[in-house]
Image: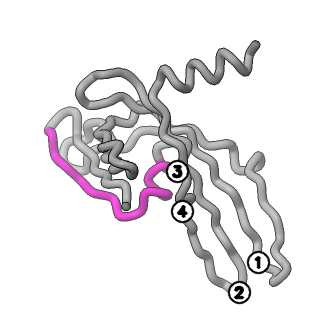
Amino acid sequence: MATERYFICVECHRRAYKARLFQTLRELSRGMTTCEACGGTMALHLVFKFGLDAGGADCKVLDVFLPADKDLDAWKREDGKWVTFFPFLVVMEYTDKRGQAFWLSYWHTVEGDASKQTKYGQWAPFLNGYLLKSLLAQARG
């Protein structure tokens, strides 16, 4: 299922929708989005629907991280097209204030022959804050 998304202005509470999540996250990794109506800050909300009867989550995005363009992995395919890997770390809070969550979303772009395709990573992990903290503590040893 697609991840639902919408912006809400923190000032005038206007809602806005963005069609492309990849572009939206790239823009947010560079700074906040402003409301066209009042100039206030727009907060991105993501609504996830999980499989295996796990339910869902409605989250407000706190921050988005993406490696600098020079640090992204890229490679040339046999057909001459270039693939670039875009890994995101999306820091969120649940809208019901149960804590934080982290989404490790990713995309690939395939460029060549004057065309560009953007492919969504279908297996992006979504972790509750306590799970990520546990994993990081173990990794630090």
Residue at (71% x, 86% y) in the render: 113
Q: How many marks?
A: 4
Q: In the figure, residue 11 lies in which quadrant?
A: top left
In this picture, residue 120 sits left or right of residue 45:
right
Q: Nearest the camera: 24 or 139?
A: 139
Pinpoint residue 47: horizontal percent, then vertical percent. 31, 47
Please say if 128 is above or below 116: above
Q: From the viewer's perspective, is 25 left or right of 108? A: left
Mark 2 and mark 1 in contact? Answer it, CB < 8 Å: yes
Looking at the image, what colour scheme do you see? one colour
Q: Which mark is residue 113?
A: 2
Residue that mark 1 sits on: 81
Span of residues in magenta: 13-27
Q: Residue at x 48, y 40 (%)?
A: 126
Q: Is residue 30 visible?
A: no
Q: CA distance from mark 3 to mark 2?
A: 24 Å
Q: CA distance from mark 3 to mark 4?
A: 14 Å
* Mark closer to the chain start, 2 or 1: 1
Amino acid at circle 2: Asp
Give whichever of discs 3 and 2 has the lower sequence position. Answer: 3
User: Residue 53 in magenta?
Assistant: no
Q: Which residue is mark 4?
A: 120
For the N terminus, give its image quadrant.
Answer: bottom left
Specify which label sits upstream in the sequence, 4 or 2. Answer: 2
Q: Is residue 5 above or below residue 94?
A: below
Crowd band around label 1 with a 10 angstrom C-alpha radius: few (<14), some (14–19), many (20+): some
Q: Which residue is mark 3?
A: 26
Q: Are marks 3 and 1 in contact (CB under 8 Å)?
A: no
**Mark 4, secondary structure of its residue:** strand
Is residue 16 rendered magenta in the image?
A: yes
Mark 4 or mark 1: whose residue is earlier in sequence = 1
Q: What residue is rendered at 22% in x and 40% in y?
A: 9
